[in-house]
Image (spheres, rainbow, N blue to C red):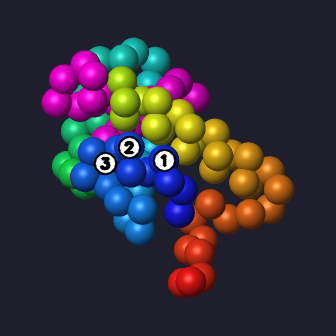
Amino acid sequence: QLEMIKGLYGFGYDDILTIPIIENTPHEAQLEESMRAAMVGYPNAPAVLVRRHGVYVWGRDWRQAKTQAECLDFLFDAAVRMRAINLDPAARSAPV
C-alpha cells in the first residue's frame, strides 16, 4: 500500500496492482503473442514488464502514459528497495 498507486488510472490506495511479466525474445516482433496474452489476462494492468528488457506502459494519451510510467517507476523502485531490506511489498498494512 503506497500512496503513489493513486496516480495510476483506475487505482486507489487499497487496490492491488499486478503487473504481468513476460519473457524477452531475440526480436521485438516476437513479443506479440505473449504481450497480447498478458494484456488479455490482466486487463486492468497499465503496463507489461519484459524480463531483462524493460517495461511497456500505455494510457489514453501521451500525458496519461507519462504519468503511468512515472508512478510505475516509483512503485517498482520502492518494491525493489523493500525487498532489499526483507519487507514484502505485497503485504497489506493493518487497518487503523
Residue 37, quarter of picture? top left
In this view of the protein, can residue 30 be seen by the observer? Answer: no
Name the outermost residue toward the front: 96
Tag of residue 4: 1
Vertical placement of 56 versus 84: above or below?
A: above
Using the image as rendered, state which of residue 80 and residue 32 is in the foreground.
80
Neighbourhood count class around disc 3 (C-alpha, 10 Å): few under 14, some 14–19, many 20 upward: many
Looking at numbered disc 3 in the image, what kind of residue is underneath it?
Ala
**Left-right relation of 86 to 78:** right
The residue carrying mark 3 is 45
Coordinates of residue 71 in the picture (x, y in percent)? 46, 37
**Residue drawn 73% across the image and 46% down it:** 81
Is 72 magenta? The answer is no
Callout 3–callout 2 Cβ contact below 8 Å:
no
In this view, the mark in front (3 or 2)? 2
Looking at numbered disc 1 in the image, what kind of residue is underneath it?
Met
**Left-right relation of 31 to 90:** left
Dividing the image into 4 quarters, which one contains the C terminus?
bottom right
Vertical placement of 31 versus 74: above or below?
A: above
Tag of residue 7: 2
Structural distance between the alpha carbons of marks 1 and 2:
6 Å
Using the image as rendered, state which of residue 76 and residue 24 is in the foreground.
76
In this view of the protein, can residue 77 be seen by the observer? Answer: yes
- Sequence-wise, which precedes: disc 3 or disc 2? 2
Residue 36, quarter of picture? top left
Find the magenta span and give its range. 44-65
Structural distance between the alpha carbons of marks 1 and 3:
15 Å
Is 59 magenta? The answer is yes
Callout 1–callout 2 Cβ contact below 8 Å:
yes
Coordinates of residue 92 in the picture (x, y in percent)? 56, 74
Coordinates of residue 40 in the picture (x, y in percent)? 19, 49
Task: Tell me the SS state at disc 3.
Answer: loop
